[in-house]
Amino acid sequence: TSCLYTDQDNQPERVAYFGQMMKTARILINTPASQGGIGDLYNFKLAPSLTLGCGSWGGNSISENVGPKHLINKKTVAKRAENMLWHKLPKSIYFRRGSLPIALDEVITDGHKRALIVTDRFLFNNGYADQITSVLKAAGVETEVFFEVEADPTLSVVRKGAELANSFKPDVIIALGGGSPMDAAKIMWVMYEHPETHFEELALRFMDIRKRIYKFPKMGVKAKMIAVTTTSGTGSEVTPFAVVTDDATGQKYPLADYALTPDMAIVDANLVMDMPKSLCAFGGLDAVTHALEAYVSVLASEFSDGQALQALKLLKENLPASYHEGSKNPVARERVHSAATIAGIAFANAFLGVCHSMAHKLGSQFHIPHGLANALLICNVIRYNANDNPTKQTAFSQYDRPQARRRYAEIADHLGLSAPGDRTAAKIEKLLAWLESIKAELGIPKSIREAGVQEADFLAHVDKLSEDAFDDQCTGANPRYP
């Protein structure tokens, strides 16, 4: 293998001369030589090498005896050709107060006849599901409600919901609630559309979601998916993610594929006007963390950046008022609700980082609400990531140098936290000071201990939690690799 770094677009003669003179099989242009055997990462037209087969490129398994012709190395000059990126979201997003019945008109006019609503018992008992079923029934749409979703969806409950779907045969599934009902509904949707599904395969990790080992089956053949959010935080109504726990083994299956993205998201702030203060605080800081991690992710792009920054601006300006005043300030509640969805679109495409990796494990082990777990960790994660010379940088072809420190400073600028002449370090400290102040204003504990976790219990589990967090899918998009 040989490698050349040069301006391949404006100085092609250098590439040609290097390719002619080097007596190597792999000639890589602007590609890390240490990863030269992984062709598809830095050149999507180049088949990955170091696979089974003969010769230095591999990938040519044969059914005859190996002869000289199979061992001839063909010189290949591979210029860097990065994969395309994408920005995916639901086909329709309805927002503003009172948008729910208007959005349901689309369900009716699209000709849907049988709707399965998936929610939890609280929302069912308090009439939230009736706001959907009454509109649909009036238009002649048959409805069925599954309201047994728990706070942490289990495979047994999801299977029960899928059995109801198989007997009722809906042509549209409507998830109503926060992250748990939406996660459960997405997985019921998979099981309804493809009962042969093996979750072990769907949950396989990947370096690039576009090149996963196991391809998700095509969705939407039997039913469309609609997500109606009743919390302001998870962003699940616009994301391709879902998590289910196998209650028989305790194994969590985090699923990530754009096939899971709902066809429609309904973000009606009337559904969150009575949200309790704790849920407002935890959800709001979850959304803050979504936007922060999406902006510094190695997969961040010019398409996701604007959404992450706008979400943070809306949250900075409206989250305290939404928390303190609740339904007395419907404008603040609505803007926080919209911000959570905007942050969801950002991280649905840019992904997250190690704050979420650790929050997933911390919350699961010690039963800490997810948004609270993120709030406890985010400042230390920023300090960890804000380094121009990290011990290890996450590998992604479009992420060519450490950028997190500069991008945290850009967030401080966008939020109006910095002053003219501030250096990068000062801007980051002001960002951290704002985060600490808003956490205090929202009544967030200052430490994991204050959140109710005993130090001895934490220390007994921290090594295993660290290993599990390292293996979390979110770790692969963090700008500094642990």
Image (cartoon, helix red, strand yellow):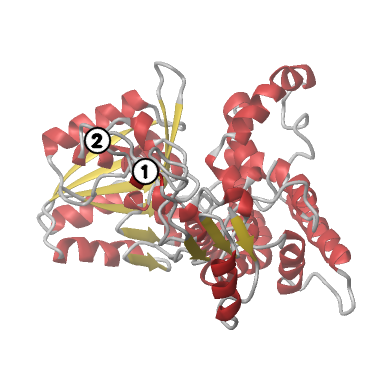
Residue in view at x 32 percent, y 66 percent = 92
In the image, is residue 48 above or below residue 334?
A: above
Locate residue 159: give its quadrant: top left
> What residue sits right under mark 2 in the picture?
63
Indicate the secondary structure of the residue bearing disc 2.
loop
Q: Position of residue 189 (x, y in %)?
A: 26, 42
Q: Is residue 333 left or right of residue 188?
A: right
Q: Residue furthest front?
A: 68
Q: Secondary structure at mark 1?
A: helix
Closer-to-camera residue (39/312)? 39
Residue type at mark 1: give it: Pro
Please tell me how crowded label 1 is: few (under 14), some (14-19), or many (20+) other residues with Cα within 10 Å: few
The spot of residue 231 in percent (x, y) is: 48, 50
- Whole-percent x, y for residue 5 in the image: 65, 67
Residue 431, horizontal then vertical, whole percent: 79, 61
| 38 or 119, nearer to the observer | 38
Q: Nearest the camera: 78 or 471?
A: 78
Q: How many marks?
A: 2
**Circle 2 residues within 10 Å: few <14, some 14–19, many ≥20:** few
State which quadrant residue 3 falls in: bottom right
Badge 1 or badge 2: first in the primary sequence: 2
Residue flagged by tag 2: what amino acid is it?
A: Ser
Visible residue check, residue 132: yes
Task: Tell me how far mark 1 sits from mark 2, CA to CA.
Answer: 15 Å
Q: Quadrant of the rendered structure where residue 105 is?
A: bottom left
Q: Nearer the viewer, mark 1 or mark 2?
A: 1
* Residue corresponding to mark 1: 68
- Residue at 43 percent across and 17 percent down: it is 249
Residue at image x 57%, y 80%? 13
Position of the C terminus by quadrant: top right
